[in-house]
Image (cartoon, helix red, strand yellow):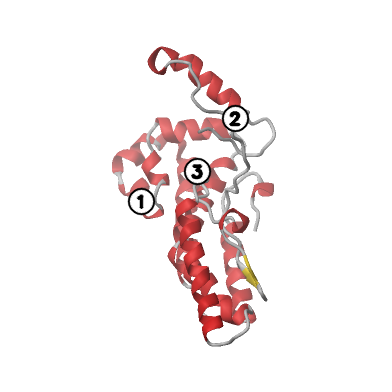
Amino acid sequence: LAGTFNLPNHANPKDIIKEYLQDYKWDIGDKIIRAGYEGIIPIRRCFDSFIANNFLIMGDSACQTNPIDGSGVAASMYAGYYAALPVVNAFKHDKSLNKKTLWNYNYTYKTKIGPEFVALDIIRLFLIGRDEQERDLNYLFKRRIIEARDLQKSNQQRSVFTSLKRLIRGLDRISLLKKLKKTIHLSKEAAALYRDFPPEYDPSEFSNWQKKLRVIYEEIPTEKEKLISI
């Protein structure tokens, strides 16, 4: 499985596979068992709301995927369950399907799955929003300041700056470390905000929540503002 961001000058996933096979064909062989499946996967935080009157969305259409690797089967299955609960409840009590009766779907997903994904999305925007993206990414990973496991679960991000060894490895790029530290702080703020998502439909309260989220995103230390989609 290979993928790239939909940005100018990024490699074609097929070319990535070909290069990998060329480099490791003596270990894994060069026979392709299955190939040809292509698709576009949303890799960003989920939409602020998944509902409207007599309408709801879930899965890729709601951007309910992991912003780092695009995986989303488990999250989409949970979303289907969370969405079904208020629908069944509305039918059971002979209520219409509107924003008020469907709101619990928003609330449950945002507070249970949303915190981890929004934190990872902020980390993602920082990593790809560098003018010298490839150089900075290689530096952070080669020096093991960031490790793959740090991007698998948002609650592991605290390990980046609680390890003295990691800090020492990055002493020659203090400016980059400071920006990374700020980004991790913002990711935790965003996760906390998702856990504080409005429990009931209130347009004013929801609007205030969105404004707070926008402020967090606007503070991400990225050098490519166009990457930040609110």
Q: Is residue 74 something one can see in this rendering? A: yes
Residue found at x 41% / y 12%: 26
Which residue is label 2 attached to?
36
Residue at mark 3 to residue at mark 2: CA–CA distance: 19 Å
Residue at mark 1 to residue at mark 3: CA–CA distance: 16 Å
Which residue is label 1 attached to?
156
- Nearer-the-camera pick, 32 or 188: 32
Would you say 179 lies left or right of 218 here? left
For mark 2, give the secondary structure: loop
Which residue is label 3 attached to?
69
Mark nearer the viewer, 1 or 3: 3
Q: Which amino acid does label 1 sit on?
A: Gln
Mark nearer the viewer, 3 or 2: 2
- Nearer-the-camera pick, 26 or 134: 26
For mark 3, give the secondary structure: loop
Residue found at x 56% / y 56%: 59
